[in-house]
Image (cartoon, coloured by chain):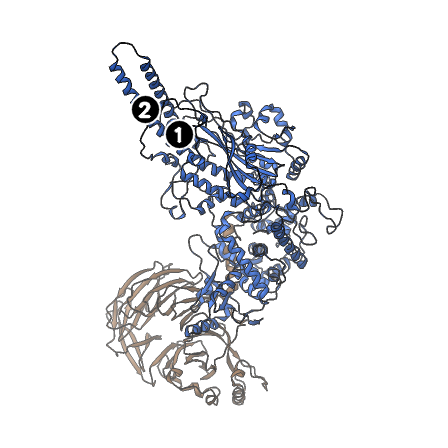
Chain colours: A blue, B brown
Amino acid sequence: MISAPDVVAFTREEELEDELCSEPPLPEEYSVPLFPFASHGANPWAKVAGSKFTRDFILISEFSEQVGPQPLLTIPDDAKVSGTFDLNYFSLRIMSVDYQASFVGHPPGSAYPKLNFVEDSKVVLGDSKEGAFAYVHHLTLYDLEARGFVRPFCMAYISADEHKIMQQFQELSAEFSRASECLKTGNRKAFANELEKKLKDLDYTRTVLHNETEIQKKANDKGYYTTQAIEKANELASVEKSIIEHQDLLKQIRSYPYRKLKESDFHPYEPECAPGQANAGCGRDLTASEPAETHLYAHVPSYTPKLIKAKSAKCFDKKLKTLEELCDIYFFTQTLDQLHQIERTFRGDVCYLLTDQISRALLKQQSVTNFLFEDVSFLDEKPPEKQYRGCRGLGQDVVDRKCSEESPAPKVVISLGAYKSSVECVPIKMEQEIEDSQEPKMTESVTFDHQENLDYLDADIKGSISSGESIEVLGTEKSASGLTKSESQASLPVSPSPQAGRSKVGSRRTVSEDSIEVLSTCPSESLIPEDFKASYPSAINEEPYADDEEGGLRFAPKLNPDNADEQEDVSKQDNLVQVDSSCCIGKESPNFLEPLPDLGQKPCDEDGVVRIPPQPYRQAEQGLRGSFGGFPSHDGISGGFLSYELDSRYLTGSREVSKSSLDECSDSTSYISSAASTCSDRTPSPAHPACQASERHKKKAGQNALRFIRQYPFAHPAIYSLLSGRTLIVLGEEEAIVKKLVTALSIFVPNCGVYAKPVKHWVTSPLHVVDFQKWKLIGLQRMASPAGVNVLHALSRYSRYVSVLDADSKTLRCPLYKGTLVSRLADHRTQIKRGSTYYMHVQSILTQLCSKAFLFTFCHHLHLPISEREPEESVVNRRMNFLKLQLGLANEDIKIVQYLAELLKLQYIQEPGQGVNPLLRFDYVPSFLYKI
Amino acid sequence: KSSVQTIGEEQIQNPYTELLVLKGHQDIVRFLVQIDDCRFASAGDDGIIFLWNAQTGEKLFELHGHTHKITAIAPFSSSDASEEKNHLILTASADRTVIVWDCTSGRQVQKVSCFHSTVKCLTVLQRLDVWLSGGSDLCVWNRKLDLLCKTSHLTDAGISALVELPKNCVAATVGKELVIFRLIASNDGSEGWNVLEVKRLVDHQDNILSLVSVNDLTFVTGSHVGELIVWDALDWTKQACECNFWDSSVPPDVQPEIKLSQSPNETSVQHLTSDDECVFAAVGKGIYVYNLQMKRVIACQRTAHDSSVLHIEKLPNRQLISCSEDGSVRIWELREKQQLPAEPVPTGFFNMWGFGRANKQANQAAKKMQDNTPMYFLELVGDLIGHSSAVQMFLYFGELGLATCSADHLIILWKDGERESRLRSLTLFQKLAQNGDLQLKF
């Protein structure tokens, strides 16, 4: 974790900008930030007071052709969730903003009905009266009996927090698209089945009719046709026509996957293999094989055709199919799973989500150091692989993984502008060709000339039509297409800062009487004039967070540009030196005696409360572009970001204050979140599915660790042992007690590689030197038996390699610790009460430690002589100076960083093929016995 | 109460702060032999020979071929003038075979299986480009593994140790006897050799356990009952004999105090090593330093270990390493005793076990005897604890570290942590440069 979300919850959003723009007139400690939503309520969490539901939920509703908009189901399926919230009303609202072109039936130039493969549309919608904001995902499903064969549905993620919807739009969109794709795939399968049945019926009917006509013909020798015969013949003809129509429909629905594949950004729903099956050969090559979806239609259960009336009655007494019937059952359950997953993923406070996403994005880039203290499971996440797989069982965890794969680097979208341009719409091409052949290659002839993802959504708020109507549509294709080209371009400029954009939305809402504001929508192409499309050719896939306009890694200007001659021969090293020219060794400062220059603004203010709001992605991207992932440029915000990361004075200088405020912060967060019923969610929950499994473990470990540091006065030397790589053995008779202690202490154990933590919870046999190589934290059973004597004997024999924590007699035998680092990590007077909070506190300090270790490891001159003649002693001196003065480490803290640096080195120089030889490093230092 | 000196946990002079455990053997590892600057071979009772990289601990080869335990191993580097040195090793096993291995390819070069008894020792005479195998008889082989000549059957016990002497002679220990053989070029020219028994020396009272060549002029033998005999390497005469030196040496009156049990195991000379001046003897649990010029023991550590010392070696820097059945390895330093007129507090370790008085007396006695002679003592500067069973042997690799092998089937590489850390940094920056990570990547 980069930072604890609980900390972030207390920040003011405009803080950073304020600091950058101008110095606050008042001293910081006197300036009380004005709460932006002060008019709404007393506390920051009261802004959602208007909502009538207690937590976020997903609503699926349908615009029924019989009864109009109606809610179908909610996720979670619990009446308490929606509370007094009027689902019917809200369904009406969300279904009324469906802008997808659902043009169906007989197109003018075509003889047969055409299926319109409509893209989903994604709309953000707000209802300030209801206090509800929703991400609405419209989709259409096919139903043979429905009007125009289509049934419009929508899935909506409804939250009381507008910011959450806006900022998580991308993630929501990606997740819902997956769910939608799954549902539609199932629907196509069901539709194809239905068509086939219908065809069989028709075929049977035709045969019957044909026979009847023949009989009539034979029976009738009068030479003219009776009305009955003519009727039969007409009926036969209409059946024939119906057959052709249905065959055509079937062809269309079957060829769908082929056509879609040509679109570069089409991600067909891929049912995934269970992990065990993943490598069982079900993975297919994209180019070599046909889409998996076509196989879905392979098996049609035997069906007895029945006689049908040629004219199907289209009337309102007919019962429409339910959503479940519309979709293949397997895919339906998958979709529901997916939706549940979405609900789980996005529940909780938005700042939690944001912080988590940011820290994830940052951690991904810290590829050199992140193995030390981060979750192995998280690091194991693979980059997305586009692969077709056979249809197999789909485990929940696979879905989880898939979710995370969808967005390999969680994109943190803060500004409205960014959000807008990231709303991509896939143009819908209406096909005019009539396909005669069933061969798949024919489908290739279908071309899409205008594949550009049009991005004209920048015609945003400013271009919105403000009206007194109950529905305010802010940016739909209607308004956009209504504009002339020049007009739409004129409206392009987005509000310069995310803050301004957001506050604008907020303020307007307060003055507006409108009950519904559609903030944005994703239009379908069908309504866009051709010339309009062509005017935005450059918008393809352009996502603002991916652009390189920042130029990536930027180094500070050289401290001394004069000595260019020196820089030549050490140019390679320079890159590293420049990495942080303030605290790395320059040749100018071989002894590290100069103090840290203040880089940019100090992001932590006097009372030590972390004042950094969730960092906008730009900073993060800019700062962490390099392969080392940690060198921000020195201009503006990022400079401050760096000094925040590395400034050893951060949290050290005013440790007590900062800690207490930190704790207070987190605790008040928890207090408020549990006390305020208006909170969008009472249970802050894991934001990311990947870590959901370990979340409970974290909580527990954090709780146990808290207990440990409060209970044992010698927690510091014990933690020091772990951090410095000296194996700690927890000795005890009771397995449960020992395991609890081991769990508690395990959060302090650095990983030796990208494997599991070197923690062994319970051992009963005598230990050997090999075990100390492998394990850094061991729970050991104390036994009275002779075997137990051996265990203890081995322990005393190898006592120089281990610290022993006796859980029974509450003693600790380990080296002395006089540093300051661990006391920050584990203060027994800490006010932190929750395990997860403490876990994050630990993680953030460990991350800080990692960055120190990283700097230390990768500073060339700290380890190797600058010139060939330089004696080893001066390198050693320089190294120690760096550790003491630049990194601000005292006494034993140096050993911690040195140990972490060794781990980093080992990890980096490890050849990929061969496993690293685990080595045991130790010191000849005396141990002391600590007692309670 | 154990009378063994301990050093505690603070060992400033002990450079070994990093260890690597090399796993592979499935039985006692008895032999370690250096192949070149950075490789060594290990062998033991499982009949497998492993080749290791002494720097990285990487397992290079696993040589299978013997069906019984290995009884002797010797490196056999080619003395060819050719550029590439061909490293071979010879291994003898209880399956009565000797195999020649190529260390570069890890392949078996040749196998000799015409022995009537187990070969217990192997010696390579680089000068003559032959090698000798000693079992119940002594055989002489050339590089191509042709049997050049052999002696008649000596005893059932066979030759237990061989050492090369000047003038094409070898000394072999056969039980209590020391037999001198001479290799004589055969009359018919070519490269044939004849082996001739020249002399049989029967001065030892018990089995000779150790045999070491000091220099071209002297060699030393030690026996099971603690006799140490210094021989002239040219005429094989006894230069000096130190019988029972363990109880007649430095402080003669200490013995009753420390109550050394005089069982043969306690006094057997397990291993000998030497530098130019001194012979270092592992006698029972103790270590004795015998000065060849002064012809007396100049320093000793009676109970250097908890049990028998199995192997000792002198390092260039006046340090001595010993390993023992108790599973520990200890590093000693031979120090000159300060010749203070009145030693108020005895230095070193003696004070801890009541040696103080005796030491002082000895000191005074020594001063009385020869005031100009420096006095020495062995100071424990570090111990290495890692093995859980007897440490059979070790191999000193200079700054690369120390390899120890043990009955717990393990080999441990002890390394200087500081140096390793520096090397890793070097590798790291090399790799950075190689990967181009030093350049900016976007």
Task: Inspect this view and state whether residue B218 appears.
Answer: no
Would residue B277 be found to the left or right of residue A620 on screen?
A: left
**Disc marking residue A205:** 2
Q: Residues within 10 Å of mark 2 (few under 14, many from 20)?
A: many
Q: Position of residue A525 (x, y in %)?
A: 52, 27
Q: Residues within 10 Å of mark 1 (few under 14, many from 20)?
A: many
Mark nearest the camera among 2 and 1 is 2
Query: Which chain hosts label 2?
Result: A
In the image, B234 versus A106, the foreground residue is A106
In the image, A726 versus A759, the foreground residue is A759
Would residue A744 be found to the left or right of residue A198 on screen?
A: right
Residue B329's quadrant in the figure?
A: bottom left
Disc 1: which residue: A255
Question: Mark 1 is on which residue type?
Answer: Ser
Work out how far the residue at label 2 is from the one at label 1, CA to CA, in angstroms.
Answer: 27 Å
Q: Position of residue A302 (x, y in %)?
A: 31, 34
Q: Dot 1 lies on which element?
A: helix
Same-chain check, marks 2 and 1: yes
Residue A595's quadrant in the figure?
A: bottom right
| Of the image marks 2 and 1, the number of the one nearer the N terminus | 2
In the image, A627 versus B116, the foreground residue is A627
Q: Position of residue B120 (x, y in %)?
A: 31, 73
Task: Inspect this view and state whether residue A827 appears.
Answer: yes
**Disc marking residue A294:** none
Query: Which chain hosts label 1?
Result: A
Which residue corresponds to the image point at 28% horizontal and 19% vertical from the top-left?
Answer: A212
